[in-house]
Image (cartoon, grey):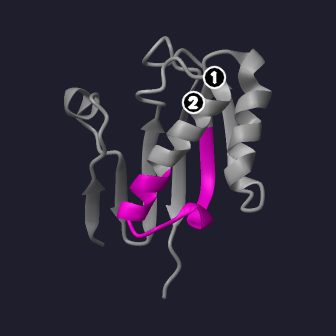
Amino acid sequence: MTRTNIPGTSPYEPIIGFSRAVRIGNHVYVSGTGPVGAEDASPAEQTRVALNIIKAALEKAGAGFEHVYRTRMFLARVENWEEIGRAHGEVFGKILPAATMVVAPLLNPRWHVEIEADAFIPEA
């Protein structure tokens, strides 16, 4: 199977050594995506920013949100779970991927959330 690395715009990519997403065959794996540039935004808005970055990576890989079957949300603080969850639901409320929320320290202390996504593109 062919592997395609999909770069993003994160300043951390060259430092850490990762791609925003990787497509292998019909599978797309989107790296943990923080709300770069929205450090002062609310948890919900940071979630929307991270999801927009994920959307761009999926599109570069030939996929869309409708192909996402799994998300993982890493929350800096448990008390923000509902606000972050509602913003996630704005995108995935009808798609209903398997989803997980985990509370963990994040790379940037001003981030409220970081999100990963996995997608599968069915055969045409």
Residue range in magenta is: 55-72
What residue type is disc 2 on? Gln
Asked whether, in this view, residue 48 is left or right of residue 29, the answer is: right
**Regarding mark 2 in the picture, which secondary structure is present there?**
helix
Q: Is residue 64 shown left or right of residue 103?
A: left
Query: Quarter of the image holding residue 105?
Result: top right
Q: Quadrant of residue 22?
A: bottom left
Picture coordinates of residue 75, whole percent (x, y):
63, 24
**Residue 101 percent location from the top left of the image:** 69, 33
Instruction: Using residue 101 as the reference point, say whether residue 56 is left or right of it.
Output: left
Residue 28: mark: none
Q: Look at the picture and state if 49 lies above or below 3.
A: above
Inspect the magenta stretch and tell me whether residue 74 lies in it: no
Q: Give the numbered dot on residue 42.
A: 1
Query: Which residue shows up at 57% across the image and 66% down it?
Result: 67
Q: Please, which residue is most extreme toward the left here?
A: 14
- Graded by Cα atoms within 10 Å as few (under 14), some (14 to 19) or many (20 or more), the crowding at tag 1 reads some
Q: Is residue 57 magenta?
A: yes
Question: Seen from this angle, which residue lies furthest top?
Answer: 109
Determine whether label 1 and label 2 are within 8 Å by CB.
yes
